[in-house]
Image (cartoon, rainbow, N blue to C red):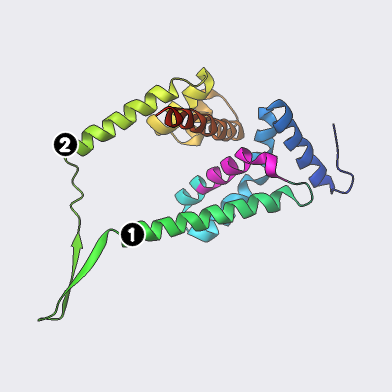
Amino acid sequence: MDVKPKLTEKGQRDYQLIQRALEYNDQQAYTNLVHYYREAVYYLMLKMTSSPTDAEDLTIEAFGRAFKNLTQYSPDYGFSTWLFRIAVNNCIDFQRRNRLQTSSLHEESYYPYIGASVVQLADTTPNPEDILIKAQKVETMRQIVEKLKPHYRTIVQMRYFDELSYEEIAQKMNLPLGTVKAQLFRSRELLYNILRKRTDKI
């Protein structure tokens, strides 16, 4: 296996794992990369968001984006540096989206005669049409998930339909936590590709 001579010992290790992941789709290589850097990414996200739930989701997204774009990684700099940059940029985008969503929830209108400011909140009660559309989307997603291989399908169903935690999934499937996370990353990528093909046909 090709090894870059100028890399540090850790850099050599990461480079070999990345090569295995790219050339052989080695799931253990993905799992090992998650194992080495998950905690560092998580605490970075926690520091930026102050929310354990958001930090966990953003950590998963960071690895997912990194693995999806792994061919763009250059060993001229550390994998951790590249990964952290992806995580930070993704977190900034997440915070920006949240601010936009929050600000769009209300609109201020002023009464010039009394100088009062009234916040007009939209009615968030779902109407029958909204409920129907949501149900159709869920059914469509179930149909797409059915196209996944059995082990990916099971883990996606547990996480997104049964809403189990990563720890609960690991326990039920008798898998290491890192493997569960790596398989979820891969499942998201497969789902994205299926959705993109469906969109291209429309």
Q: Residue at x 69, y 27 (%)?
A: 26
The residue identified by callout 1 is 102
Could you tell me residue 65's position as x and y percent? 58, 43
Q: Is residue 111 visible?
A: yes
Q: Which one is in front, 37 or 200?
A: 200
Left or right, 138 with reference to 197? left
Q: Which one is in front, 173 or 2?
A: 2
Q: Which mark is residue 83?
A: none
- Is residue 108 covered in magenta? no
Left or right, 123 with reference to 13? left
Callout 1, which amino acid? Thr
Q: Residue at x 39, y 29 (%)?
A: 202
Q: Which one is in front, 194 or 169?
A: 194
Left or right, 147 with reference to 16? left
Which of the image's four quarters has the N terminus? top right
Vertical position of residue 96 compared to residue 65: above or below: below
Callout 2, which amino acid? Pro
The residue identified by callout 2 is 128
Could you tell me residue 191's position as x and y percent? 49, 30
Q: Residues within 10 Å of mark 2 (few under 14, many from 20)?
A: few
Could you tell me residue 113's position as x and y percent? 9, 81
Q: Magenta residues, as a range?
A: 58-73
